[in-house]
Amino acid sequence: MSNSDYILEMNNICKSFPGVIALDNVTFKVEKGEVHCLIGANGAGKSTLMKILSSAYTEDSGEIYFDSKLLKAHGTQKRREEGIAVIYQELSLFNELTVGENVYINNYPKTKTGGIDWKKVYRDTQDLADKLNIKIDAKAPVHSLNIGQRQLTEIMKALACNAKLIVMDEPSSTLSQSEFEILVKVIEDLKNHGITIIYISHHLEELFIVGDHITVLRDGKFVACKKTCDLDEDRLVEYMTGIDLSQIESEEKTIHPVSDEVVLELKDLSNDVVKDINLKLHKGEVLGLYGLVGSGRTEILQSIFGVRSTTNGKILLNGKEIVIKDTGHAIRNKIGLAPENRKAQGLVLPLPVWENMSMVSLPKFLKKGKIDYKSITTICESHKDKLNVKTPSINTVTQNLSGGNQQKVILAKWLMQDCDILLLDEPTQGIDVMAKEEIYKLIHEITTQGKSVIVVSSELQELLRICDNIHVMYDGKQIFESNKGSFNQEQILHASVIGRAI
Ligand SMILES: Nc1ncnc2c1ncn2[C@@H]1O[C@H](COP(=O)(O)OP(=O)(O)OP(=O)(O)O)[C@@H](O)[C@H]1O
Ligand SMILES: [Mg+2]
């Protein structure tokens, strides 16, 4: 292939951070008009490579050709003008501004007199939303949107820049199945218009739906670039891990018994989003909440954790009615919540890993009024190893960890707290396939110790795999329940989309 068939060539890119070689002589080439998937385990260097492309980071060495031109000037604005738009894993929207203001923030249309043409801003935003087939009010402030709608707003923002190349860094990590299908259509449409897409995802099955080529990174190094049709999931995992899967013996799956003892019960619970929720969580049970983004799954957890007030109904903890006043009250009652929006709710990014991990459980480490740092270090180290958190040390600032590794820190925080009831909102969002397995194992482990878990997930496969019981939500209502013995994937999917059981 001649050079000009590549819209992007990143040659011999190197980038180091203190204690980490994030990219080690990586070469990455993308053809014009294709969807090129970039994959690798958490911390492999995917986001760093894309940040170098957008010039958010500067490479230590290497060259970038875009549209046959050597990119010299740095600065994200310059790169945007070249036609490169990057949607980062950690969204970068302004919460107080409207959807329209965010979408056109880099290039507001002007009126003849030089002011901002607000009519056009909102009209064009609405057009883009219609094209994406999503219901978003262009005038709604971003803080009123759920995380799925925010992701879609980011995609509209890239489209509004007339980009030639759009990088989507885990666009699908919080999208429901139907939203992902919308995204697939949008991607198809963009391709038809000659736009090139770089697609990063840990959902391997998605790559085979959207991708033309797949490039794999491992520990900051280039491993392979192949046509999607020449690959399967096992080969990909082998490239990602460097481990030959045929050498691994599959482990026996043990089924743990769930006791009859009800530890948490919701009776006709309502809040401003959900209505008349009834559910029982048993000791040792993993209960799943499935539904589209916005169906009320998260809000149920929030009421149990005391961050969203209930307007009606009751919560019973170990058979006794309880009004959970705030998160402190929930935590004292051994309830923990790992939230979905890790940046805003789960972590204090400027603090080191160990402080984030031990934040909630700190009182446990007080000995005669003094903090027992030695025990904290031992326990943090052991969770770091268990969850395979990739970080130079537990003293590293959490901000410097890759997205998936930050998510692991949140999980560690709640696992360290020793809760009886653990509420997990999208626990494996952004987590690579290998680490996901570890998390499933940990969930299994804590339930065999008699703890109970409620999991919200947009990934039905995940819930089918780990749950004893799944409740399906639609528009704030609980519409369908299914037990492990009789899980029916099709029924659950249908119920979540049409709002009733079939
Ligand atoms: N600003 C930074 N300072 C220090 N280290 C960093 C910084 N940004 C990234 N790193 C490190 O570089 C490595 C690669 O991180 P990167 O975010 O590119 O991984 P990734 O492949 O995107 O992973 P994930 O799937 O978890 O998002 C990691 O070890 C990470 O901790
Ligand atoms: Mg990343």
Image (cartoon, rainbow, N blue to C red):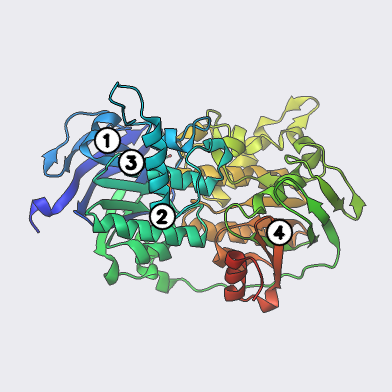
Q: CA distance from mark 3 to mark 4?
A: 36 Å
Q: CA distance from mark 1 to mark 4?
A: 43 Å
Question: Residue 179, how many percent across, how many down?
Answer: 48, 57
Q: Residue at x 57, y 36 (%)?
A: 344
Q: Pointer 3 and pointer 2: residues touching (CB < 8 Å)?
A: no
Question: Residue 206, how many percent across, how many down?
Answer: 40, 63
Q: CA distance from mark 3 to mark 2?
A: 23 Å
Q: CA distance from mark 2 to mark 4?
A: 31 Å
In the picture of the structure, the residue carrying the numbered disc 3 is 160
Query: What type is the residue that disc 2 sits on?
Result: Ser
Front label number (2 vs 4): 4
Front label number (1 vs 2): 1
Q: Which mark is residue 201?
A: 2
Query: What type is the residue that disc 4 sits on?
Result: Lys
Left of 379 or right of it: where is 365? right
Q: Quadrant of residue 456?
A: bottom right
Query: What type is the residue that disc 1 sits on?
Result: Arg
Local SS, label 1: helix
- Disc 3 residue lies near ligand 2 with CB under 8 A: no
In the picture of the structure, the residue carrying the numbered disc 1 is 80
Q: CA distance from mark 1 to mark 3?
A: 11 Å
Question: Residue 391, how many percent across, how many down?
Answer: 47, 40
Callout 2 crowding tier (Cα within 10 Å): few <14, some 14–19, many ≥20: many
